Image (spheres, rainbow, N blue to C red):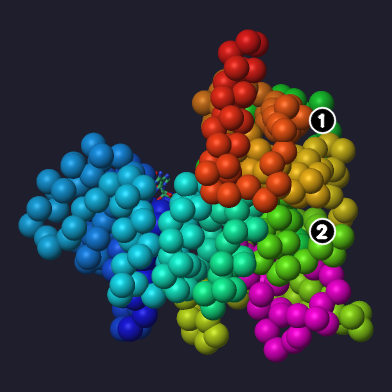
Amino acid sequence: MKKIAVLGSTGSIGTQTLEIVRAYKEELEVVALAAGSSVAKMEEQIREFHPKVAVMWSEKAALDLKERVSDLPVEIACGMEGLLQIAVMPEMEILVTAIVGMIGIRPTIAAIEQGKTIALANKETLVTAGHIIMPLAKEKGVSILPVDSEHSAIFQSLQGFKRSELSRILLTASGGPFRGKSREELSVMNVEDALRHPNWSMGRKITIDSATLVNKGLEVMEAKWLFDADLDQIQVVVHPQSIIHSAVEYVDGGIIAQLGTPDMKLPIQYALFYPDRRPMDTKRVDLFELAQLTFEKPDMETFTGLKLAFEAARLGGSMPTVFNAANEKAVSLFLDRKIKFLEIPELIQASMEHHKKVDAPNVEEILQAEAETYEYIRQVVEKE
Ligand code: NDP
Ligand code: MG
């Protein structure tokens, strides 16, 4: 039995992780679950998967949950303390980090320190703290197994080859719901338009990130850390069918790619059973039905979020944190209909220009850069 814990169990990645556990009950055991405020969903999950510990972010939700499951032997905790308690549980072997946002940093670090394997969906963690997490994982001999589909594809394409033979990473992007649109057209797009992703069904925040191409920018930074690549080695390729999930080019020009239908369950399952593969009930790629796969260069002049991400990555230090924090705040303002779609990259740019970069920030400094960025955006938006 592999013993796993899922941070963000009620979300898109979290529920798909539990679907895999359901299909492989004899091999996977859930020892802990954590969520934000979805108490009813958490109660259902506890009744089905019997974790030893369940955590809700808010104290109120945790109290509510405690009452609902008082007939069961499950320990209920809350807040960061609860997340950290899960991260260091002695029996837990694999931590699935499927929370949204920078809140994932501290539990991920705590779990690595205890030698736990990380199945990493929470890309914001590597974007902001990759310089802390990757060396620590190396020191502790911990595997960071990517769950993000592109990074899983790259990871799968690297199996059996030497990392030193890699020359380029071809990071594919669907282009999101607004591919091919002009800035003028983008200026009038609303929340519903942006949430209509053509290929993937995901949580709200990452779906907006796909529409701005900020998601691809975060993924460039994630790839840089996971595969120890230079930014110049990472080429974003728009591939609207989302069948090639990414590829790697080797020094001799050979390209190895991973293909599949757009279904997150495959990369999640691959991480849970790595290095083995298990049968999976998913739609198969039918090349005859597809007939063609197409590719385009990303339009960074229209989708400036991607350009800003490369800039933040090149500057390094605390700048990726500012990029990410400004985006988190701007996306939540957009979802609350307080700002327009194109104000998302505008706020990111303004925040980056306003920030005084700190080199190699520690966790405190990362969280401080995040707080300062939030405060800066609050002031900018209030002034308008
Ligand atoms: P969702 O919004 O669907 O789910 C987020 C999960 O995190 C929910 O369970 C939510 O609980 C929980 N959560 C939120 N805040 C807290 C908190 N403070 N403490 C504890 N739990 C919290 O997100 P996704 O599943 O889409 O994304 C999760 C991560 O995976 C993101 O980093 C995203 O970028 C990445 N990712 C997602 C992909 C996808 O297909 N969805 C693909 C690749 C990467 P509650 O329900 O109570 O709010
Ligand atoms: Mg992805």
Write the start and end of the magenta stretch as one range.
147-169
Vertical placement of residue 44 versus 378, above or below: below
Q: Is residue 54 left or right of residue 311?
A: left
Quadrant for the N terminus, please: bottom left
| Residue 293 percent location from the top left of the image | 80, 66
Callouts 2 and 1 close, C-beta under 8 Å = no
Q: Residue furthest right?
A: 252
Q: Crowding near pointer 2: few (<14 within 10 Å), some, many (20+)?
A: some
Q: Give the distance between the C-alpha atoms of the residues marked 2 and 1, in whole angstroms.
A: 26 Å
Q: Residue at x 86, y 55 (%)?
A: 296
Q: Crowding near pointer 1: few (<14 within 10 Å), some, many (20+)?
A: few
In the image, residue 158 lies in the stretch drawn in magenta = yes
Vertical placement of residue 177 versus 20, above or below: above
SS type, badge 1: helix
Is 80 in front, or is 343? 80
Q: Residue at x 16, y 48 (%)?
A: 66
| Residue 140 percent location from the top left of the image | 52, 74
Q: Which residue is mark 1?
A: 183
| Residue 65 percent location from the top left of the image | 20, 47
Q: Which residue is mark 2?
A: 231
Can residue 264 be spotted in the picture? no
Closer to the N terminus: mark 2 or mark 1? 1
Q: Is residue 116 left or right of residue 290?
A: left
